[in-house]
Image (cartoon, helix red, strand yellow):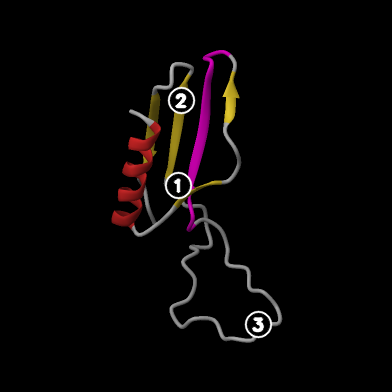
Amino acid sequence: MSRVDFHQWKTNEEKATLSYFVKRRGATQSSRQQSTVCCYYCHRSGHFVSKDGRLRRLKMQGSCRIAAFCPAAIFTRTSATGKLNFYFAAVMF
C-alpha cells in the first residue's frame, strides 16, 4: 500500500468512526529491519483541561475527551523499499 492510499483510508475511517488519529511524536527508525515506524493515536484519549480566564462558556455538549486512555490506534511500518504496512486496533470507547 502506498502512503497516499493509507492517508485516504485513514480519512475514510475517521469519518466513519467520528474520531481523528493523530501522531504524538515523529516517526522512529528501526535499524534492525531498516524501516520507519509511526503511531497514530485516537484524539479522544486523556482528560479535558480547562483554561482559566475564558470569556465564553464551555459548550453544552461537553468535551470529546473520555478521561481515560482510548486503545484505538494505527501503527504503520514503512520499509526501505517504500512499502507501507499497518495495523489498526479498532477498539473505541
Q: Looking at the figure, which quarter contains the N terminus?
A: top left
Position of residue 59 in the picture relative to residue 29 (left or right):
left
Position of residue 29 in the picture relative to residue 75 (left or right):
right
Label 3 to label 1, Cα distance in Å? Answer: 31 Å
The earlier-in-sequence mark between 3 and 2 is 3
Q: Are marks 3 and 2 in contact (CB under 8 Å)?
A: no
- Name the kind of residue labelled 1 in the image: Pro
Q: Could you say which is closer to the camera, residue 53 or residue 93?
A: 53
Residue under label 3: 54
Which of discs 3 and 1 lies nearer the camera? The answer is: 3
Q: Label 2 crowding class (10 Å Cα cut-off): few <14, some 14-19, many 20+? A: many
The earlier-in-sequence mark between 3 and 1 is 3
Residue at image position (44%, 43%) is: 73
Q: Could you say which is closer to the camera, residue 42 or residue 82?
A: 82
Q: Quadrant of residue 55?
A: bottom right
Q: Which residues are magenta?
A: 32-44
From the viewer's perspective, is residue 64 above or below residue 70?
Answer: below
- Name the kind of residue labelled 2 in the image: Thr
Q: Are marks 3 and 1 in contact (CB under 8 Å)?
A: no
Residue at image position (38%, 27%) is: 85
Return the x and y of residue 21 as percentages of the image width and height.
45, 49
Residue under label 2: 78
Q: Label 3 crowding class (10 Å Cα cut-off): few <14, some 14-19, many 20+? A: few
Say what secondary structure mark 1 lies in: loop
- Name the kind of residue labelled 3 in the image: Arg
Return the x and y of residue 70 as percentages of the image width and height.
47, 52
Q: Is residue 39 magenta?
A: yes
Residue under label 1: 71
